[in-house]
Amino acid sequence: MKSLNTNAVHWDPYNQEYFRDPYPVYRRLREEAPIYYNEEYNFYALSRYDDVQRLLGDRDAFSSKHGDLLEFISNKFEYPKGMFIYEDPPMHPMHRGILTRVFTPKKMAALEPQIRAYCANALDPLLERDEFDFIADLGAKMPMQVIGMLLGIPSQDLKAVQEYVDDRLHAEPGKPMAVDRDFSFAATVFADYIEWRLKNPSDDLMTELLNAEFVDETGATRTLSRGEILIFVNILAGAGNETTNRLIGWTAKTLAEHPDQRRQINEDRSLISQTIEEVLRFEPPGYAIGRYVLTDVEFHGVKVPAGSAVMGITGSANRDKRKFVNGDAFDIHRERFPHLTFGFGFHNCLGNALARVEGRIALDEVLNRFPEWDVDMSKATLSSTSSVRGWETLPASAPKAKRSKAIA
């Protein structure tokens, strides 16, 4: 059995030095310490594609029951019943199966007219401005409107909902997220909506959740409890807003830095889909996914004991040269291999189809109005937690002579 070379390279998900450009240390991890141990926070990390894929796909050896954030895994946090993204069988497939009826690629694609309308409402006022912000003016608006539409939340209440969601996900830069949180959601902003929708059913996801019947772990056929629905709604609101928000930011920044490729996309919109996939690979909003080790396992001759926390660095795996040729280069024409941004296997992101649809539409509508743009990195604000990395502000400007008013 090999021993760990703890002096080869250093990485921890709270270190601010890595946030702006973590990729040099990722390269070193892949080559020098593919199974890495951080003594300070007592966790292991995997950085190569095949290893991260194994971590996410082997549910017999690796558990999601303590979550996928290092802070919660290390504290062996116990989530309430219904927190399906942090469940193992038999609860996970039972709860996830309810939402898979709704979050199909076909159903998400059918939302395109409404999503385009939200984009137009956000972007059209920017045509007369000298500067705008890709996050404040689009990324923070459109995704929450889509979630509001899905859940049946009135538009006038979306700002309060977004403030609540942002507060739930907030972490101090450079510090672990606080684990003393109430995950029952009993007193959250969504509780009143559920009770109101129970009396006023409509054609939305919240109504579907209230009426969905399923066979639970005891064999009984029933509907979801109020507590389970609250958990579902909070998961959807949080994940649906944050991932797409950050995807929009990374798309804007990356294409500003690659104007030749942006020009190709503008001239040939059939490239948009593969562009979004390349952005997701190149700058994943969620760069690490954790698991709790159920039984002793081995990576590269190193034993990882049961009870350990292991982080799969998807941001590194997505650039592994063993899977992606010249992985540190942004190339919308590269040969397609599945990236790990939305996870892999049983816990792959349920909302990935919606995020992709929103990302494609947002890019298309931005190009309709702003074929060219620059971002002001001196004023941009980067935010990162132990698992998510993206822009809080991303100021930009576009040549007025080249702007065009989109036709809806």
Image: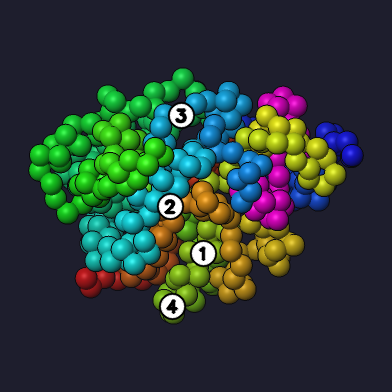
12 shown above or below 76? below
Give the Cα distance between marks 1 and 2.
16 Å
Give the Cα distance between marks 3 and 1.
32 Å
| Residue 311 sits in quarter | top right
What residue appears at the point 13 percent right and 37 percent down from the top-left corner? 196
Q: Does the segment drawn in magenta span residue 37?
A: yes
Residue at numbered disc 2: 350
Give the Cα distance between marks 3 and 4.
43 Å
What residue appears at the point 33 percent right and 56 percent down from the top-left corner? 101
Where does the C terminus fall, quadrant-wise? bottom left
Give the Cα distance between marks 2 and 3.
19 Å
Give the Cα distance between marks 2 and 4.
25 Å
Range covered by the magenta-colored residues: 36-56
Q: Is residue 400 visible?
A: no
Where does the N terminus fall, quadrant-wise? top right
Q: Pick whichever of labels 2 and 3 is earlier in the sequence.
A: 3
Give how far across and how far down residue 350 sits, in percent.
Answer: 43, 52
Residue at numbered disc 1: 277
Give the Cα distance between marks 1 and 4.
13 Å
> Of discs 2 and 4, which sits in the foreground?
2
319 shown above or below 264? above
Residue at numbered disc 3: 79
> Of discs 3 and 4, which sits in the foreground?
3
Disc number for residue 270: 4
What residue appears at the point 45 percent right and 40 percent down from the top-left corner? 91
